[in-house]
Amino acid sequence: MKTINKLILAMAVLGASAVAQANDSTFASLTYGQTSDKVKKSSLLNTNLQNPNADGIINKEGTWGVRLGQQNKEGRYYATYDNVSGSHNGLKLRQENLLGSYDMFVPVTASTKLFGGGSLGVARLSQESSGYSRDTNTGYAIGAQVGVLQQVAQNVSVELGYRYLRSNASTEVNEHSGSKLGSLQLNSSAQTYLSANYAF
């Protein structure tokens, strides 16, 4: 918990220093990428469902997201919402992330920048498998992202990025009768994405 509190404080300080810049501009983004998750199964689930491949449920699945934030020459801070779902061997999971992030820019050319930063927020994991009761739980999400940002017009840029998150969001698999068959916990997720950004 102390580590999380320190990260929240660090992101708040970085965000506050970005706000202080006089040349900030607002930007909005639409993102699309592929997400793969590492999911921990309970021993009860392994017994009842014959050791299903939980890592295969969300594996290179298409992920849509939206972002809104502020940026300047030194960096940017922004909020992101994204959504991904997948199914495998009769199990279906949906992951939703709501994140606050800060990136620092490293110029390469006049129109190209590298970026890297951290993200902190929440992840919601929903079990939506056919034949079982729906269950949803929210946990923390913390991670980092890197990538390259290319300016293509005065107010338009595109980027290629990679983000890695750790989480503790979990969900249960229950029969409609209420009998618990086991649980699934999201340990980590990795996403490669493309983004189109518009500054205004």
Image (cartoon, grey):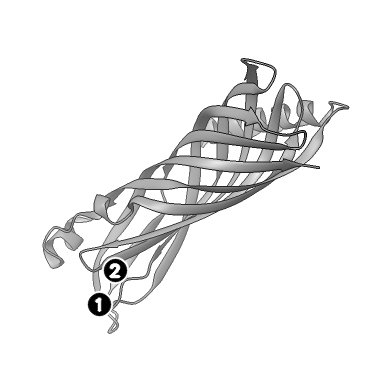
The Cα atoms of the two marked residues, 1 and 2, are separated by: 9 Å
Q: Residue placed farthest to the bottom in the image?
A: 177
How busy is the neighbourhood of tag 2: few (under 14 within 10 Å), some, or many (20 plus)?
A: many
Q: Which residue lies furthest to the right in this view?
A: 22
Image position of 13 with respect to 69: above or below: above
Q: Residue furthest front?
A: 153
Q: Does residue 139 appear left or right of residue 116 in this picture? A: left
Instruction: Measuring from the top left, give residue 151's x and y in whole percent.
Output: 67, 30
Q: Answer few, some or many: residues within 10 Å of disc 1's Cα (few below 14, many 20 plus, some between 14 and 19).
A: few
146 to 174, vertically: above or below: above
Residue 65, image x and y in percent? 56, 52
Q: In the rendered image, which quarter contains the C terminus?
A: top right
Q: In this view, does 142 lie above or below 109?
A: below
Label 1 SS: loop
Q: In the rendering, which numbered label is found on residue 88?
A: none
- Residue at 41% x, 47% y is 34
User: Residue 51's spot in the image, x, y percent?
Assistant: 13, 58
Q: Do we see residue 55 in this rendering? A: yes
In which image quadrant can residue 129 be found? bottom left
Q: What element carries label 2?
A: strand
The circle on residue 179 is 1
Q: Which residue is drawn at 52% across and 28% down?
A: 147
Residue 83 horizontal/vertical position (percent) = 49, 57
**Residue occupied by mark 2:** 173
- Left or right placement of residue 56 versus residue 61 in this view: left
For the residue marked with disc 2, what is the amino acid? Val
